[in-house]
Image (tube, rainbow, N blue to C red):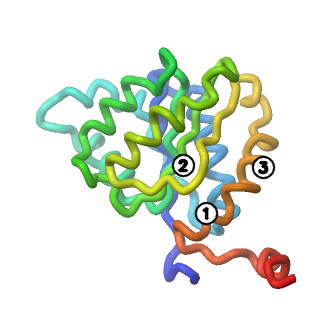
């Protein structure tokens, strides 16, 4: 099944530092996904730039635009560094602004950056349940990378993509490239 229009990819970054390495990793993963799925350039939402607006009423137009972009994504990369063996409070504060089905129809890909392999399951144990509770579909395993992987994220993404491609293509309604169809037919 081919989509009538290209999938909208958004990268949501929960690192409290503006322009962080987590932002770079999210942009890289979202760009790679856009290339693989032949979609438009991804939109980046860096929560560090919106942090002051998260607890202000009435909400700012910038925060409303970010909330709408994330909820309107076909494919959402949710990136966070590990903070106290979980995802950041900044990301939690942003996600708390949605109701129970606020991310219904969104396919999410958790991306977790940590300093140690001991935190490899943070995305699966802590972030995935929150995304599912908000109505998102999470068809793949979390892409967990170490700080050292950020020097060259390509190999980690390539290893992850081998298992993630089929479920992601199904979830966003993207047809497989012609070469992949030949392999399936054999």
Measured from the top left, where is residue 139 in percent x and y? 54, 56
Position in image of residue 76 (x %, y %):
48, 52
Q: Nearer the viewer, residue 1 or 20?
A: 1
User: Relative to the observer, which residue lies in front, 67 or 114?
Assistant: 114
Judging by the rendered image, the residue that carries numbered circle 2 is 109
Q: Is residue 166 left or right of residue 66?
A: right
- Checking the image for residue 167, the label placed there is 1
Compared across the picture, whether 141 is left or right of 50 comes to: right
Name the residue at 51% across, 19% down.
85
Mark found first going from the N terminus, 2 or 3: 2
Q: Residue at x 64, y 46 (%)?
A: 29
The location of residue 106, given as percent across then percent down, is 41, 59
Q: Rounded to the nearest whole Å, what is the CA distance between mark 1 and mark 2?
A: 11 Å
Residue 98 vs 139, above or below: the answer is above
Q: How many residues crowd mark 2 within 10 Å: few (<14), some (14–19), many (20+)?
A: many
Residue shown at 58% from the left, 33% from the top = 112
Residue 69 in view of the camera:
no
Q: Is residue 107 above or below residue 86?
A: below
Mark 3 burial class by Cα count in 10 Å: few <14, some 14-19, many 20+:
few
């Amino acid at each position: 099944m081919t989509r009538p229009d290209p999938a909208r990819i958004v990268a949501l970054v929960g690192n409290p530092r503006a322009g962080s390495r987590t932002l770079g990793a999210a942009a890289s993963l979202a760009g790679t996904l856009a290339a693989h799925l032949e979609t438009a350039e991804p939109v980046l939402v860096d929560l560090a730039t919106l942090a002051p607006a998260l607890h202000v009423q009435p909400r700012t137009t910038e925060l409303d635009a970010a909330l709408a972009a994330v909820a309107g994504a076909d494919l959402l990369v949710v990136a966070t560094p590990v903070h106290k063996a979980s995802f950041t409070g900044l990301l939690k504060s942003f996600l708390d602004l949605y109701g129970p089905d606020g991310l219904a129809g969104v396919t999410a890909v958790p991306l977790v950056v940590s300093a140690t392999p001991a935190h490899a399951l943070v995305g699966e144990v802590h972030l995935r349940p929150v995304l599912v509770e908000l109505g998102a579909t999470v068809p793949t395993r979390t892409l967990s990378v170490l700080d050292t992987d950020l020097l060259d994220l390509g190999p980690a993404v390539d290893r992850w993509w081998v298992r993630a491609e089929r479920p992601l293509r199904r979830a966003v309604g993207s047809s497989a490239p012609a070469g992949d169809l030949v392999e399936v037919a054999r």
